[in-house]
């Protein structure tokens, strides 16, 4: 297999599926001296799937379609022959009890690490499904939930079940009040002395998400951190202090933004939680899944699932949701508390795969009006790359105008220690959160790096006062986290970055950062902006333009969404749903 890079199927995988060359060399190692095309195709498929976030490959239509797209002939016959004769590859493919690099189980092929992770996650979930009620004072809890004003019935159901049960999964889109649910759960548990503060922990996949929750429950001294920090990750030997043999010391754990957690981290996390500990899992099943392999919450909640509760929830939810076989371990939050009907309707169509959408056609001449639009969804069909560049520079320069930079320059007159967080500085921080360009990728002409670079050139500087900055690496000493956005301001004592939490850090002390006039949709998860511009390239690989990506981008906006691209590209994204293979 010395000429593996010249293989026609490998070439196509690298070019069309963006298969990293590191994976190609791993395939070469696994192949060894074998020169069998069927095995090469299976390994190629496994790495393509892994690169797209799947845990395994299955002998199904998806695999057949992949082989057809790779240009393989007699697909059904060749796949059937491989699986019928799989024992001939016993050196590298074994059963569930084997220690081979690849495991064949449940008509699926896994890499060993992901097989063990998936099995461990399934075992943890099965153990928890049979757990008993944690709080038997049901009438008191019902009275508490009934007393809460301005909550949807499903929010109340989520709070009620989270208090009385050991294990609950809560899923809801942006604006459905997930963080409100967390706050009321915590309030009850502490006020009624069910747990002490030190017995509760809240975990998230990112520091930014942890910081947001910490601000919401700031009156309580509860451990709120990333999953890695909660488990005490050791970067030197790639291990966790808390694990299957050394459990976490908490009686109640809430994990938020679960959709962003990959299967390997999820395994480590769940394995470290004592069975007797209350576990509340929260996320959005329709949002972008984790960057690494896995799609836990979208797999654990069945396709088309609707809320269904036992009689225990009578008087909390309407009778139509009470069923004889009602399940009390999953709650979907379905009501959005945002007033933007048009954006919500469009997001619903995207999420359901409905290509029959209505969208306003936006023209270059409307740029100045865009920032006063409310509940708006539009598309700007640029003619060519140059027209796209002209358009986003016009959008950014209109929003970040002379008035904005004049206000920034006023701070040159004071020392940073004299800064008072008055309405002026609050307005500037609100300004950088008011409009964001969201991209599919970092790189390329339509990526955020290029857009930030071009606007910096337009302003006549590489970086400087007025630039929004996104932190890309956690710094626990400075309490700055991946995804935090601040604004650069020039004071008498130098250039500094000011954050919404009133933290001021010298520019030369910042951890790894990037300019943030534009950011990727992945990076925008967990954030909200008044208005967004979503950049869709003229030519884009199918794996990049998906329903989940578009849904996530659209739902970042509270007032207006503008998509730079064609209606055909929007329709393609709506059709192109991420399907990650797993047996959870």
Image: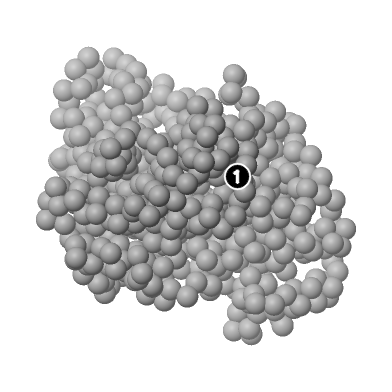
For the residue pair 80 and 518, the one nearer the viewer reads as 518
Give how far across and how far down residue 47 sits, in percent.
Answer: 34, 33
Residue at the (56%, 58%) spot, across then down? 423
Give how far across and how far down residue 44 sits, in percent.
Answer: 29, 32
- Whether residue 115 is visible, yes or no, is no
In the displayed structure image, the side of residue 139 where residue 366 appears, left or right: left
Q: Secondary structure at mark 1?
A: loop
For the residue pair 535 and 52, the one nearer the viewer reads as 535
Give how far across and how far down residue 56 sits, in percent.
Answer: 42, 40
- Whether residue 417 is visible, yes or no, is yes
Residue at the (30%, 29%) spot, across then down? 20
In the picture of the structure, the residue carrying the numbered disc 1 is 419
Instruction: Quadrant for residue 513, please give it.
Output: top left
Instruction: Quadrant for residue 170, please give it.
Output: bottom right
Q: Is the residue marked by circle 1 packed among few (<14), some (14-19), or many (20+) residues within 10 Å?
A: some
Give how far across and how far down residue 533 sits, in percent.
Answer: 32, 57
Q: Is residue 133 above or below residue 1?
A: below
In the displayed structure image, the side of residue 286 where residue 89 appears, left or right: left
């Amino acid at each position: 297999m010395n000429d593996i890079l010249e293989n026609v199927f490998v070439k196509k995988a690298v070019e069309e599926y963006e298969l990293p060359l590191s994976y190609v060399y791993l395939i070469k190692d696994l192949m060894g001296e074998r020169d069998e095309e069927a095995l090469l195709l299976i390994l190629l498929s496994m790495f393509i799937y892994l690169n797209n976030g799947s845990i395994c490959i299955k002998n199904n239509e998806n695999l057949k379609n992949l082989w057809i797209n790779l240009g393989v002939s007699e697909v059904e016959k060749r796949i059937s022959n491989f699986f019928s004769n799989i024992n001939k590859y016993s050196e590298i493919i074994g059963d569930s009890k084997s220690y081979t690099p690849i495991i064949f189980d449940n008509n699926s092929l896994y890499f060993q690490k992901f097989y063990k992770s998936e099995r461990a996650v399934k075992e943890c979930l099965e153990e928890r499904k049979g757990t008993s009620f944690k709080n038997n004072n049901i009438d008191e809890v019902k009275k508490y939930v009934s007393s809460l004003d301005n909550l949807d019935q499903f929010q109340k159901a989520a709070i009620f079940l989270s208090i009385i049960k050991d294990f609950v999964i809560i899923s809801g889109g942006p604006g459905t009040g997930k963080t409100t649910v967390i706050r009321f759960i915590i309030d009850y548990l502490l006020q009624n002395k069910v747990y002490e503060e030190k017995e509760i922990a809240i975990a998230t996949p990112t520091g930014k998400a942890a910081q947001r929750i910490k601000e919401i429950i700031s009156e309580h001294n509860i451990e709120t951190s990333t999953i890695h920090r909660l488990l005490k990750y050791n970067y030197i030997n790639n291990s966790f202090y808390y694990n299957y043999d050394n459990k976490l010391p908490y009686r109640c754990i809430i994990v938020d933004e679960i959709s962003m957690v990959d299967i390997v981290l999820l395994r480590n996390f769940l394995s470290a939680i004592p069975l007797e500990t209350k576990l509340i899992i929260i996320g959005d099943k329709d949002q972008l899944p984790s960057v690494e392999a896995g799609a836990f919450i979208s797999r654990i909640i069945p396709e088309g699932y609707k809320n269904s509760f036992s009689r225990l929830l009578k008087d909390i939810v309407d009778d139509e949701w009470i069923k004889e076989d009602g399940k009390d371990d999953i709650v979907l939050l379905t009501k959005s508390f945002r007033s933007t009907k048009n954006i919500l309707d469009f997001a619903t169509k995207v999420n359901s795969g409905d290509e029959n959408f209505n969208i306003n056609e936006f023209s270059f001449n409307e740029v100045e009006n865009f920032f006063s639009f409310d509940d708006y969804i539009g598309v700007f069909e640029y003619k060519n790359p140059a027209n796209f560049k002209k358009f986003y520079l016009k959008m950014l320069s209109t929003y970040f105008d002379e008035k904005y930079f004049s206000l920034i320059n006023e701070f040159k007159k004071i020392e940073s220690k004299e800064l008072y967080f008055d309405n002026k500085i609050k307005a500037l921080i609100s300004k950088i959160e008011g409009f964001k360009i969201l991209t599919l990728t970092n790189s390329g002409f339509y990526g955020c790096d290029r857009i930030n670079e071009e606007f910096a050139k337009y302003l006549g500087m590489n970086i400087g006062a007025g630039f929004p900055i996104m932190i890309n690496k956690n710094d626990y000493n400075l309490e700055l986290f991946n995804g935090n956005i601040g604004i650069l301001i020039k004071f008498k004592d130098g250039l500094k970055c000011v954050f919404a939490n009133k933290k001021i850090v010298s520019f030369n002390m910042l951890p790894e950062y990037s300019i943030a006039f534009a950011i990727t949709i992945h990076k925008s998860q967990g954030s909200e902006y008044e208005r967004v511009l979503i950049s869709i390239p003229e030519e884009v690989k199918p794996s990049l333009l998906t329903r989940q990506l578009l849904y996530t981008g659209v739902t970042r906006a509270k007032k207006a969404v503008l998509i730079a691209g064609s209606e055909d590209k929007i329709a393609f994204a709506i059709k192109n749903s991420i399907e990650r293979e797993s047996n959870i």
